[in-house]
Image (cartoon, rainbow, N blue to C red):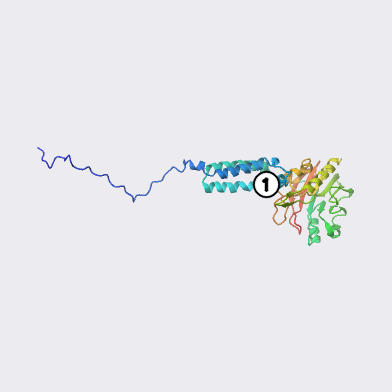
């Protein structure tokens, strides 16, 4: 028989559960990977990525009537690619999957527009080396600049913005280039005979010429042009009306040129992407685009941000294109080797 001490008491209180061990290390959680916040965060960054993509893809739709905004954007269009790493960095800081995915769109568009410019397309061969340089009318050392250009190996040398130092360029270049013609502020020096030189009227004073160079491979028409400068101010925007009018006049002269083998060189004060220059640039082929390496930026010489100095051709094949080392000008010289 059980004694009262052996039998459980109906009134005995249940044993309380053990206290949790607060000293134990917290267990890792795995909710971060599936946290819906990574998709909800960063919507502003994603919106900026979309804006960058729209600017790249639809730059031609940006109106040019007020302040030439379209031309301004197109002048520096390749630099829109900087938005991609900046926005991607912001997406990583915010840990936003939405923003990271959105940045892929402008990255793909920029690559399709400009990725080919990063390739080295230079090749051997060619019959004619052409160099063009805006020498800067305020150049403090014109003779030194002329000697550097003569040492470039150019067969044909075009200079823009000659100014008061024209005679010094003529004296310095005379030994290497027995033939030359100057019209106002532009000039053409050549190892081969030059004839049929005339001014191309694109501005109230001479800023362009047309001449025929008699190369061993036959005649080539060369246009040298310096379109009028553009200015930018917060009040008036991108003031390019005078430049655009000069471009239209130059385009008319190019269309009227009967010789198929034609080369246009010079400072156009605009890039190939600028729609306002399309009447000049679209019928011609860019030596840099077809046979260069990189963007070939030329201005300003100390830190180039735009290629406004060009060698454009038709009826000949660009084999290579490059920029030359800086002189005492604010532009870099450009060069191309052409197959006639």
Q: Quadrant of the N terminus?
A: top left
Quadrant the C terminus occupies:
top right
In the image, 158 versus 35, the foreground residue is 35
| Residue occupying the far left of the picture | 1
For the view shown, which residue lies furthest in the top direction? Answer: 1
Is residue 122 visible to the viewer in this orientation of the structure?
no
Task: Name the residue tied to disc 1.
Answer: 78
- Up/down of 317 relative to 148, above or below: above
Residue at (80, 60) in percent of width and height? 142
Residue 66 relative to residue 18: left or right: right
Local SS, label 1: helix
Q: Position of residue 202 (x, y in %)?
A: 84, 47
Residue 172 versus residue 88 in the image, above or below: below
Q: Residue at x 76, y 45 (%)?
A: 287
Q: Nearer the viewer, residue 48 or 300?
A: 48
Q: Nearer the viewer, residue 18 or 337?
A: 18
The spot of residue 39 in percent (x, y) is 51, 41
């Amino acid at each position: 028989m059980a004694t009262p001490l052996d039998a459980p008491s109906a009134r005995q209180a249940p044993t309380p559960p053990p206290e949790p061990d607060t000293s134990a290390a917290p267990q890792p959680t795995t909710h971060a990977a599936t946290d819906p916040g990574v998709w909800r965060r960063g919507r502003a960054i994603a919106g900026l990525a979309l804006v960058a993509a729209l600017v790249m893809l639809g730059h031609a739709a940006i109106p040019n009537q007020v302040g030439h905004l379209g031309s301004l954007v197109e002048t520096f269009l390749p630099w829109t690619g900087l938005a991609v790493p900046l926005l991607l960095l912001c997406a990583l800081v915010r840990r936003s999957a939405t923003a990271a995915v959105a940045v892929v769109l402008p990255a793909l568009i920029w690559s399709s527009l400009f990725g080919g410019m990063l390739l080295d397309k230079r090749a051997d061969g060619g019959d004619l080396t052409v160099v063009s340089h805006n020498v800067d009318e305020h150049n403090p050392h014109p003779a030194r600049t002329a000697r550097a250009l003569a040492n470039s190996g150019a067969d044909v040398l075009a200079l823009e913005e000659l100014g008061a130092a024209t005679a010094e360029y003529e004296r310095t270049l005379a030994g290497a280039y027995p033939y030359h013609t100057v019209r106002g502020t532009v000039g053409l020096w050549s190892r081969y005979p030059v004839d049929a030189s005339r001014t191309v009227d694109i501005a109230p004073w001479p800023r362009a010429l047309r001449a025929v160079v008699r190369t061993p491979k036959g005649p080539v028409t060369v246009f040298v042009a310096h379109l009028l400068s553009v200015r930018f101010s917060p009040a008036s925007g991108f003031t390019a009306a005078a430049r655009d009018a000069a471009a239209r006049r130059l385009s008319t002269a190019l269309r009227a040129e009967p010789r198929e083998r034609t080369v246009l060189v010079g400072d156009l004060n605009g890039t190939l992407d600028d729609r306002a220059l399309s009447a000049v640039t679209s019928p011609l082929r860019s030596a840099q685009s077809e046979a260069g390496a990189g963007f070939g930026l030329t201005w300003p010489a100390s830190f180039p941000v735009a290629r406004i100095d060009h060698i454009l051709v038709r009826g000949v094949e660009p084999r290579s294109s490059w920029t030359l080392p800086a002189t005492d000008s604010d532009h870099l010289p450009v060069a191309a080797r052409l197959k006639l």
